[in-house]
Each structure stands twice: as structure tokens, then as C-alpha cells.
């Protein structure tokens, strides 16, 4: 195991072994190993390695805490040198996680041009296109020839993050189109960029939400998206690897919210942390459970006349909850993919239809089972009707709740299942026990 | 709306309007509009547009059904010409969806070299690295100089999908390393590729599962992954845009399975389709609901003595289900990200601890509420004990079930929640009603 190898090398101050590990392992694997070490071990390790190696490690998906810890422990002067090996959007991410005081220190000590760019980028919300973008793109004037473009790229390519797409601008630096790097190889040297550029560029603005950016990238199969201001001046670019991280992040968030978990929690979180993060959801659930329970209380007379009702009623509520979760899942996913909008009522009609059909079939099976178990036909009639009612309720609420949450600018994955199970529990208990009360003379 | 514009243009056979739309809209938007049209309208539209425009439309995320319909309706000879504008992995996807007979027809009519490559790719499972890859990469011999590499790229670049990463091979075509296209611009003309190549290349084999490929791409921040055989001969490459689609696909699948929905269903599926796909899950849930209900039946004597128990028992079972869903969500996501493995028992101990703490706190709140509602201290004692027991059960099963499903080569997102709620319902009803039976002399 890499972790143990590092620990042994550090214990023996065996620098040669550490250099070998850096050479032989990918920075992402080194970073994962560092996550397992004690703070002092990490700092010692960092002091052994080169600035470039440290830069590569900081650019991986290392945890925010560890990143900040390392940056705070390394001397300012060294860190400035480490930054020279890092891409600008990664530096922005790190600076964004530091205290304002530390961030200022870094910006003051950098070259003017660099710190100006960084400061502008730091001003954007990290969850928007502005927060994701880097200014290290290649912009070429439309009047350059292919040959001149080649010579320019030769000079500036090493500092730029993406070179396969070249952005072509006019004298006012407004974006006119893109040129693929392969055109620089294959078109004739004397052609002007303005003649070979592709004018249909799909772009976003700095305030576009990162989820929207990832939808656009997915839909149009883009490998890089330019970020432009309202005058179509190019401000920066967003690269595909950043989009992959956004998609992973948004997915984890959606799934966690649907499951009632805080998106910061991982499997490694300590017990106290887990309890702190999960408890709020459970307390909300507890209140809604009491709401459902109070519906049962309303019908205590009915239940006292026939205890079998107590056994059967969770079946109705549970099945309604399951059917509603199916609807919520479909709608939440469709919302995340931008495929459904508020006011699209046809979808709800379909969900009502599906609820009715599924309620009829599963209710029929349940009715037969109850009739056989208790030898009472009317109990079967009550459960089939109640299940149809509750599954129709499930269809309506399962469709409506995520749309409503989105309408009020919430995340539809959040609270949708909480509201839903409240609706299906209340609906299930009420319809089943209510119908049982009506049919009581026939039931006992 | 583009859909109506297309319909009007088709009705009036207004070819000029159709050319304009093709010029002014992105193929992905055209494709979305086509999804809304009747089949005959689609075929008419396709007959109006150029082969290149059709190729661009077929390369977007158009639905499989529509893609196959178009390919079947277009004459063979035209389709072969359309293919010349498409990238190889997209052609493979299309051919893979056709009948064996049609696929053979196409392969027979193609140039020998093309059809050989395609036939090899078609042999791979579409969900593996082999199924995702394209053979349109640039491989250069290690003995070439930078200048010679430049001249070679000049000739072959237009047919290759990725040119920012050049793969360097030896005389036996074994992969030696990669060279970044910017090195071709910035290194001196006479240097050999063997001197400037990066030998640490992360690669996959053709049988690597697509989920595994997307994890590797995410972890190592790759923009392209080479696919090699066991001798390290490069067979193909996988591009970043394909990875984005894999991640989207795998994630939708996980979320759907957790929500009890078939991954083929969308919001647009007709009612009959929805019912057919959801009913199997609901029937399974119905059987497990009866299992839980039969536990309640065991205690019908207890309930008949105190109807308040009927109202309180769904609180215990529901809270256990919610707590267990939280655990399942964390574990399923960790499994998808490759962060947890079978036999990692520390995690389960943590979940037991979290279950105990959350049960104690929410059970305490519930106990106070019940004591106030019914004026009975012992009812409070019963519910707090029952909630602790059920939430510990939730922690154990919520952790164990996804790992067990994975162990038996199932998808952990599948059936985990069904098994879980069965466990927490049975556990909740049994512990609450069982404790109530023990405490009965004090309760009534």
C-alpha cells in the first residue's frame, strides 16, 4: 500500500524513496494516499517534494480541507512558485477556499497581470460559469493568416489550457467564431482566419448556473464552452474536465437529497458528523409521521371495532409512497435534464392514469389476499378502493411537488420525498380508514 | 417554435426555408424538433437536406428509435455517403442498433478497411471500453522527429477524432507514451518523439466496464483514454464527450433503480408503458408490505387492548425506513464511486452508532409527544426503545444490503430500498408491538 510506503519513507527520512514514489505514481493516487495520513506526515511529505510535484497533487480531486491545510502550512514564497505550475482555474479554487486575509496576501505578492485576472475570477459565484472558467484560452485576431496564427500559437501555447479550439476575435475583441487546431495544420498558410472560422459558436454568460452549463455541453457535445459578456466579448473558457466534475457533483447532490442526506457527508464521516447532518431530516420526517399518525387517531373507534384494519392500513400507505417515489424520481430527473417545465399538465394526467391502473391491479391482488385471510369480501372492497385513491394521490403529488419546489427556486430533489410521503401516508390512512368507517356495518 | 416552422416548410415544400433552418440552428436542436414530428414528416425533411447535414443530426443525442427509423428509410447508397461524414464510434452505435441483416449489407458495401475496423468494434459489448472506443486516433512512431510528426499530422489530421493528444508507438506498434500537440508547436524541430514523450499513460483494456472507465477519467482528469490489449498495443481511444454520456447514463440508471423505476422510462412514456414498467416493482413491494402487515397481525390482542398503539406504530416503522434510506444512499453512491468494498466492517459500526444516536434523539421527541397526547409515561418508554432498536436495524441493513447485492454481482441501487424497507417495517412493528406487549400491564 502506498500509504504505508510513504509512512515508512517519512519515518526514515528516506528522500530517495519519496522521489521514486512521485515518479512512479500518478498525482491523483499520491493525493488519495495523503488523505489517509496525519497532518504532520503530510507537511513533512510536502517539504520533501518539488514545487511542480506539489502543484500536480493540488490539481487533483484532493479534499478541500487537505488542500487548505497544505496551502496554509507551506511558506508564502514557495506557494507562489507552486502556483506558477498550476492552471488558473485551480488557483482560483484554492484562493476561494482561503480566508480573505490570506487571499489578499497572495494577490498582493503576485504579478499585477496575474492577480488582476484572478481577482476578477474570484468575484464570480463558484457555482456559475464565471466561477468555472479560466482566462487561459487562445484568442487570435480574425485578420491573421493561418501561418501567422501558427507562429502566435508557437509562442503562447505553453501557458494556455486548451489549444485544440482557437477563438477568433475582431479588433474590439468580440468573439467572431472558432477555428479548430487541425485547420492550422491543413489549410493553406495564406488563408485568413476570418475565411475559415466557424461562426456558429454556442456560448454561455458568466452568471449561467453550472448545472445549465453541463446541460448545454451534454446536449451540444461540446469539448470547450466560451464564456462571453452581453456584448459577446470573450471572458474565458470552460473545459470538459471541469464539466465532468460538475456533473458528478450535481448527481451526488440530487441523489443525496432524494435519500435525505446532506451532500457534504461521505462514508468516512465520523458518527457525530453523520448524526449532526442526518438528524434535521429525521426530525422533519418525525413531524410528518405524527401528522399521518393523527389521521389514524381520528379513526380509533373504527379500529377498536376491527383490529384487522390496523394490520392492513400500512399496506395502503406504503404502496402509495412507493408509487409516488417512482413518479418523483422520473420528474426530478426530467427537471435536472431540462426536459419538463411548470405548467406541463399533460404529464400529470398520465401519472393519474398510471396511478389508477397500478392501484387497480395491486389493489386487486391485495383485496384477494385480505378476503382469503379474513374471510370478508367487504374488507377487499375497501382496500382496492383505498389503494386506487392513494395511488392517484401519489401520481398527483409526485408530479406536482418537484415542479412546485422548482418553481419556488428550490432544488426539486430536496424535500420532494418528504412532502410526498406525508401526502401518501395521510391519503392512504384517510382513504382506507374512512372507507372502512363507511363500510363498518358490513365489515364486522 | 422550430417544430412548427419545419412542419409549415414541409407542407409548402419550401426547400429554401429548410436550408435556412439547417444553417441557423444547431443539429442538436434540429434533432430535438424531429423527435416531435410524425414519421412521414421526418422522412420528407431528411430527403430535403444534404448528406452532411444528416450526418451531423445523426451524431447528436437523437433517440435510438428515430435514428434506426431514419437509417432504414434512407437508400443504402445515400446512407453510405452520410457515413463518410460521421465519426467511427457513432457509425458503430448506429450499426449496432440495426438488424444483423442490414448491418451485413452496410459492411459488405463499404471499403474493406473501413468495414474491417467497424466489424472489430461491433464485436465488443457496447457497455465496455471496446464498445465506446474509436480507432480514429493519431499514432506516430517514436523515431519520428517533431518536424516529421508535424508533416504526418498535416496529412492525417482531418480523419482523426482527437488531435490534441498524439500516441507514440514503437516499431511493433506497442504504446510507448503520449505527446501533447502543443509540444509539436514548441519543441525544436529535430527532437525525436521518443525524447519528449510522456511515458506514464493511464490506459484501459477493451473489456473494462464503462462505469470503471468513467471513474478512471474522473479520478485522473483525463481528456482522452487509450484502450490497449494485454501486450500494450493501442487498439483505440475513448473521448471525453463519450465519458460525459456514460456518466449521465449510469447516474440516471442508479437514481431510477433507487426510486423503483425502470431506466428505459421517461416522462414522455405513454400510460400503458409506464404501468408495464412500474408494476413489477410495486408487486414486489406489495408482497413485502404483507410480510410487515403479518407482524402486526401477530399482535392483534395487544392492539385490541390499546388502540393508540395502532396510531403510533407507523411512526416507528417510517422513521426506521427513513434512517435506513439515508444509509443506503451513502453506501450506494460510495460503491458507484469505488470508495467502499465488501468486508469493510468499520463503516457498519459507524452506522450502528449513528442509528443509536438518531433513534435516541428522535425517539425522545416522539416519547414526549406521546406522553403528552395519551398521558401515559410507559407508552413513551416503549416508543423510545422501539425507535432505537429499529434505527440500529436500519443502520445494519442499510449498510449490509447494498454491499451484499454488489457481492452477488447485482447493481446495488437495485432492490436495496425494497429489502431495506421490509427490514425496517418488520423490525419497527415487531419491536414496538413486542415491547408494548411486555409493558401491557403498565400501559392500560
Image (cartoon, coloured by chain):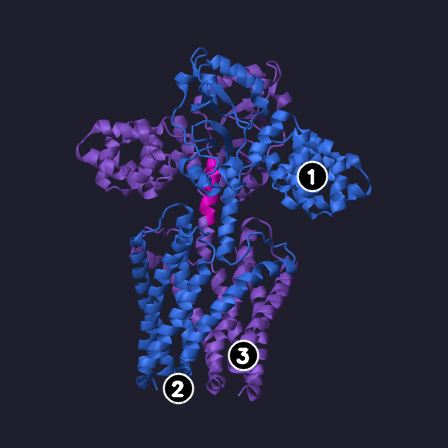
Chain colours: A blue, B purple
Kindly identify the residue that appears in the image at 41 percent across and 21 percent down. A197
User: In the image, which residues are magenta?
Assistant: B241-251
The answer to whether dots 3 and 2 both sit on one chain is: no
Q: Secondary structure at mark 2?
A: helix
Residue B394 left/right relative to A362? right
Label 3, label 1: how far apart the Cα atoms are: 54 Å
- Asked if residue A26 shows in the view, the reply is no
The x and y percentages for residue B80 are 32, 29
Q: Residue at x 30, y 54 (%)?
A: A345
Nearer to me, B152 or A54: A54
Which residue is disc 2 drawn over?
Answer: A305
Q: Which residue is mark 1?
A: A71
A441 w.r.t. A39: above or below: below
Which residue carries the number 3 mark? B372
Q: Quadrant of residue A212?
A: top left
Examine the structure image and report whether residue B249 is included in the region drawn in magenta: yes
Where residue A52 appears, x then y in whole percent?
Answer: 68, 31
Q: Tag 3, which chain?
A: B
Q: Check residue A159 in the rendering and tell me which mark sits there, or answer none.
A: none
**Relative depth, front residue between A312 and A103:** A103
Q: Residue furthest left?
A: B12
Q: Nearer the viewer, mark 3 or mark 2?
A: 3
**Mark 3 closeness class: few <14, some 14–19, many ≥20 residues within 10 Å:** few
* Distance of label 3 from label 2 (alpha carbons): 25 Å
- Residue at 50% across, 17% down: B152
Q: Is residue B7 magenta?
A: no
Amino acid at each position: 500500500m502506498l500509504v504505508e510506503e510513504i509512512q515508512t519513507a517519512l519515518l526514515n527520512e528516506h528522500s530517495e524513496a519519496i522521489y521514486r514514489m512521485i515518479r512512479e505514481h500518478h498525482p491523483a493516487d499520491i493525493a488519495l494516499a495523503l488523505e489517509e495520513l496525519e497532518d504532520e506526515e503530510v507537511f513533512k511529505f510536502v517539504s520533501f517534494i518539488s514545487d511542480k510535484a506539489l502543484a500536480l497533487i493540488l490539481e487533483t480531486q484532493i479534499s478541500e480541507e487537505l488542500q487548505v491545510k497544505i496551502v496554509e502550512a507551506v511558506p508564502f514564497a514557495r506557494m507562489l512558485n507552486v502556483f506558477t505550475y498550476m492552471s488558473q482555474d485551480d488557483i482560483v479554487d484554492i484562493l476561494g477556499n482561503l480566508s480573505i486575509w490570506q487571499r489578499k496576501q497572495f494577490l498582493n505578492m503576485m504579478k499585477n497581470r496575474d492577480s488582476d485576472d484572478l481577482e476578477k475570477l474570484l468575484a464570480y459565484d463558484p457555482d456559475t460559469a464565471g466561477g468555472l472558467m479560466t482566462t487561459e484560452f487562445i484568442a487570435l485576431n480574425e485578420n491573421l493568416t493561418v501561418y501567422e496564427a501558427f507562429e502566435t500559437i508557437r509562442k503562447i501555447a505553453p501557458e494556455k489550457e486548451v489549444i485544440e479550439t482557437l477563438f477568433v476575435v475582431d479588433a474590439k475583441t468580440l468573439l467572431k467564431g472558432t477555428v479548430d487546431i487541425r485547420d492550422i495544420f491543413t489549410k493553406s498558410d495564406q488563408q485568413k482566419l476570418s475565411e475559415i472560422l466557424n461562426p456558429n459558436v454556442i456560448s454561455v454568460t458568466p452568471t449561467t448556473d453550472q448545472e445549465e452549463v453541463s446541460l448545454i455541453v451534454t446536449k451540444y457535445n461540446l469539448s470547450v464552452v466560451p464564456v462571453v459578456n452581453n456584448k459577446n466579448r470573450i471572458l474565458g473558457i470552460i473545459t470538459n474536465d471541469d464539466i465532468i466534475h460538475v456533473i458528478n457533483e450535481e448527481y451526488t447532490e440530487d441523489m443525496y437529497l432524494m435519500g435525505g442526506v446532506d451532500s457534504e457527508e461521505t462514508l468516512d464521516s465520523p458518527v457525530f458528523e453523520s448524526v449532526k447532518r442526518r438528524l434535521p431530516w429525521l426530525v422533519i420526517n418525525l413531524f410528518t409521521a405524527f401528522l399521518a399518525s393523527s389521521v389514524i387517531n381520528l379513526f380509533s373507534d373504527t379500529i377498536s371495532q376491527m383490529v384487522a384494519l390496523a394490520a392492513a392500513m400500512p399496506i395502503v400507505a406504503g404502496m402509495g409512497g412507493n408509487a409516488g417515489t417512482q413518479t418523483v424520481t422520473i420528474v426530478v430527473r426530467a427537471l435536472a435534464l431540462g426536459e419538463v417545465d411548470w405548467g406541463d399538465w399533460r404529464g400529470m394526467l398520465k401519472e393519474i392514469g398510471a396511478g389508477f391502473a397500478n392501484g387497480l391491479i395491486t389493489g386487486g391482488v391485495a383485496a384477494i389476499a385480505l378476503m382469503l385471510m379474513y374471510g370478508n369480501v367487504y374488507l377487499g372492497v375497501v382496500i382496492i378502493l383505498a389503494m386506487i385513491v392513494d395511488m392517484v394521490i401519489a401520481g398527483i403529488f409526485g408530479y406536482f411537488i418537484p415542479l412546485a419546489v422548482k418553481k419556488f427556486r428550490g432544488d426539486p430533489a430536496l424535500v420532494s420525498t418528504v412532502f410526498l410521503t406525508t401526502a401518501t401516508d395521510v391519503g392512504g390512512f384517510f382513504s382506507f380508514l374512512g372507507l372502512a368507517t363507511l363500510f363498518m356495518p358490513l365489515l364486522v
